[in-house]
Image (cartoon, helix red, strand yellow):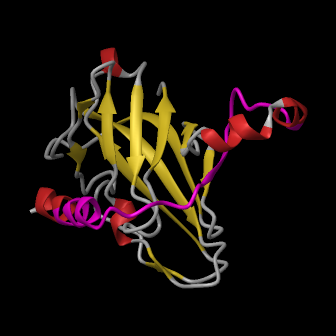
Amino acid sequence: MKKLLVALPLAALLLAGCSSPAPTVDSVAGAESAASQAEKPAAKTAEKPADRSAALGGTVTYESGVKVTVTSLGFQPVGQYAHGAVEGQAAVFELTVVNGSDEDLEAGLMSLPKVTVGDKNKQTESVSDMDSDLGLNMLSTILPGETQTVKFGAGIAAADAGAVRVEISGPNMFTDKAAIFKGAL
């Protein structure tokens, strides 16, 4: 069912051929200074597609003013009946969305991240666990000026913790590209 919920909007996006407003990125590490940005010729900046990725802990800001941040909280133990956990633990992340736009933000689909690991971006399983409150909460309507935060977990083996990629749907699934966060746990 979850795959169907994700596949339908993606199919609609592909059929519609929508373009996306360019988000900006506030990165935690490796950010270029404003001076080095000014040194680049305008033509080269215009040709390069907008970077919608950031390091884990960084922030992607969309043209609408919506800001998305994903932070790694490391590995945490889960209950014995947790679904999707690896070796009795889950990689836990915190997703924060700030609605800096002038309109209500229906953020439910942003709560369904795609987490992959390794050079080949092997998809992980989402972790659902009542004991650690993972996979049970979702973002809802976020009014202008409001912030919502949820935790989510992914089944990641400790050996794969060095190369993690988290993809969060854009604020408007028809016009905004997904925000991508990369890093180690």
| Spot occupied by residue 162 in the image (x, y as percentages of width and height) | 43, 18
| Spot occupied by residue 134 in the image (x, y as percentages of width and height) | 32, 54
Residue 8, located in which quarter of the rendered image?
A: bottom left
Q: Can you say whether 174 is above or below 169 in the image?
A: below
Left or right of residue 147: residue 76: left
The image quadrant where one finds the N terminus is: bottom left
Residue at image position (39%, 58%) is 169
Residue 4, located in which quarter of the rendered image?
A: bottom left
Residue at image position (32%, 27%) is 117
| Spot occupied by residue 163 in the image (x, y as percentages of width and height) | 41, 22
**Nearer the observer, 158 or 142:** 142
**Nearer the observer, 129 or 45:** 45
| Spot occupied by residue 13 in the image (x, y as percentages of width and height) | 29, 63
Q: Is 28 within the magenta? A: yes
Left or right of residue 130: residue 140: right
Q: Residue furthest front?
A: 43
Left or right of residue 130: residue 143: right
**Nearer the observer, 155 or 61:** 61
Residue at image position (53%, 84%) is 104
Q: Residue furthest top?
A: 159
Q: Residue furthest left?
A: 1
| Magenta span | 8-34
Q: Can you say whether 93 is above or below 100 in the image?
A: above
Q: How many marks?
A: 0
**Nearer the observer, 12 or 165:** 12
Q: Is 175 within the magenta? A: no
Residue at image position (33%, 18%) is 119
